[in-house]
Amino acid sequence: MSKQTVAIVGRPNVGKSTLFNRLAGAKIAIIEDIPGITRDRIYEEITYRDYVFNIIDTGGIDLEQNEVNQDIKNQAEIAIDEADVILFMVDGKEDITPNDQEVAKILYRSKKPIIVVVNKLDNVAREQNVYNFYELGFEHYVGISAEHNIGITDLLELITSHLSPGVSEEYKNMVTFSVIGRPNVGKSSLVNAILNEERVLVGDKAGTTRDAIDTIFKYGGEDYVVIDTAGMRKKGRIVETTEKYSLIRAMKAIDRSDICLLVIDANEGIIEHDKHIAGYALEAGKGIIIVVNKYDMLENKEQAMKDFELLIRCEFAFLSYAPIIFLSALTKRRLHTLMPMIKMVNESINREIPTNLLNDVILEAYILNPAPSYKGKRLKIYYSHQVKTKPPTFILHVNNKELVHFSYERYLQNKLRENFEFTGTPLRIFFKNKS
C-alpha cells in the first residue's frame, strides 16, 4: 500500500488553496482573491498524530479550459481517481450553487469517503450555515475557517478516521525506482527494455499507460522494483494537454521510490514541465538519474550528446550531481549503462559517513574558507554528525545558525561531495545551535 492521499475539490474561490496551506503548515500555494489563481505547489505530505498522508490541491490543476463547469468536473474526476478521502469544499457565506451541485453529482459515484468542508465560517453567526449544505446528500460535514484556523483539528480528526495510521514499508529491502517524465517520452518503452519483455502497454500516443505499474525483478542477485508512472486515465474526460495531471501521477510514484529516472526525449528537448517533475524528486530527497531517450535519432551523435549534456547542466543547474545517461529504449543501445548506474546511486543514497571522517572534512573546509562575518559575528562549527540516509542528512552544531548563508551551506555540500561518493543523491544539512 502506498501513502494515502486526500484531495481537495470544489469550485473556484472557495478557499481550497488556503486550506491546503493551513494543513501543510506553510504558505505554499499562491493565494489571491481571484478564481483560478493557483499555479504553484499542489502536493504535500501531511503528518498528524500517527497518520501520514499526501494532500492534493486540485485548484492547482490548470486544465486550460475556459469553461468553469468543465474544469471542476475534471478536478473531481482526478480526485476520484487519485484520492482515498475527498474534501468537497464549499463557501459557507453563499448558498449552494449549480457548480457545487455538478461536483456533488460526480462525487456520488466515487464510493469513497466524502467530507463536505464548509469554509469561511469565521464568526458565530455563520456557524449555522453548515446546515444549508445538508441537501447535497453526503454523510460527513464540518464547518471551518481555513484563513482563521477554526475547525481544522475537527477536520483532521474526521480525515484520519478514514485512514490507516503510519506508512507501510511496501518493498522492504528492495531497490525501488520510478520512471518519470512527461507523456510520450518513452517511459513504458524503457521499462520494457529493462525487463526485456512486454509487460507494460506501449503505444505511440501520449498517455497510453493507464495506471502506475510495479514490477519486481532481479539484477546482479538483488531485488529491484520498477514503477512505470501512469499517463491519463480516461481519454476524452481529461484533456490531452493537462500536464499537471501527469504531474500528480509522477509525484505519487516519486513518493514511493528510492531513485527516480527522469526521462527526456532527445528529439523534443527540455521543457519547463521536465523541471517541475525533477523539482519534486529533489524536494522529496530521492536519488535522480537523468535519462535521455531516443538518442539514436540524433545526427552526429557524439557532438549532439556533448551539446545536449551542456544544455541539461544549464537547464537543470539544481541537479548538478545527477548522472546523465543517453540510450535508446527501442533499440536498447547503451541500455547496459543504466542498471550499474542505478546500483551506484542506490549506494549513494544509503551511504553513511563515520562521524570522525565527517568532522575532519567539515573542519578542514571551515579552516580553508571560514564563513564571512555578519554584524561583527562569525559562524563557528563545533561538531557534525549524520542522522539519516535516503537522502544522506547531516546536523552541524554551531554557535548561531542565523549566521549561515545559503552559499556557505552549498560550499559545505560541495566539500562533502568532493570527499565522499554521493553520485545522484541530494544532500541535506541542518544547522543546530549548540546551546
Image (spheres, rainbow, N blue to C red):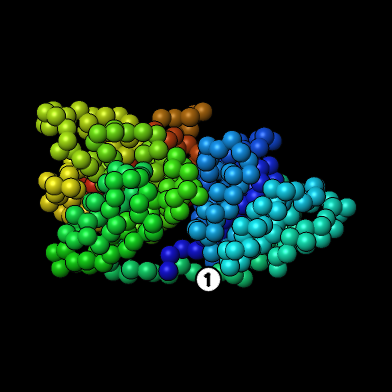
Dividing the picture into quadrants, the one containing residue 49 is bottom right
Marks counted in the figure total 1
Q: Is residue 308 among what the camera can see?
A: yes
Q: Which residue is nearer to you in this view: 126 or 369?
A: 126
Q: Which residue is nearer to you in this view: 161 or 140?
A: 140
Q: Is residue 254 left or right of residue 342?
A: right
Q: Secondary structure at mark 1?
A: loop
What residue is pinned by disc 1? 165
Q: Residue at x 62, y 59 (%)?
A: 107
Dividing the picture into quadrants, the one containing residue 304 is top left
Residue 37 lies, in percent from the top left, at 61, 36
Q: Residue at x 58, y 66 (%)?
A: 112
User: Farthest residue toward the front?
Assistant: 236
Q: Residue at x 19, y 66 (%)?
A: 218
Q: Is residue 3 left or right of residue 383?
A: right
Residue 119 lies, in percent from the top left, at 73, 51
Q: Which residue is nearer to you in this view: 350 or 28?
A: 28
Residue 382 lies, in percent from the top left, at 39, 47
- The kind of residue tagged 1 is Pro
Residue 273 lies, in percent from the top left, at 40, 38
Above or below, comparing residue 84 to residue 14 in the picture: below
Count neighbours of disc 1 (C-alpha within 10 A) and say few if under 14, some if 14 to 19, many if 20 or more: some
Pick the quarter of the image with the N terminus.
bottom left
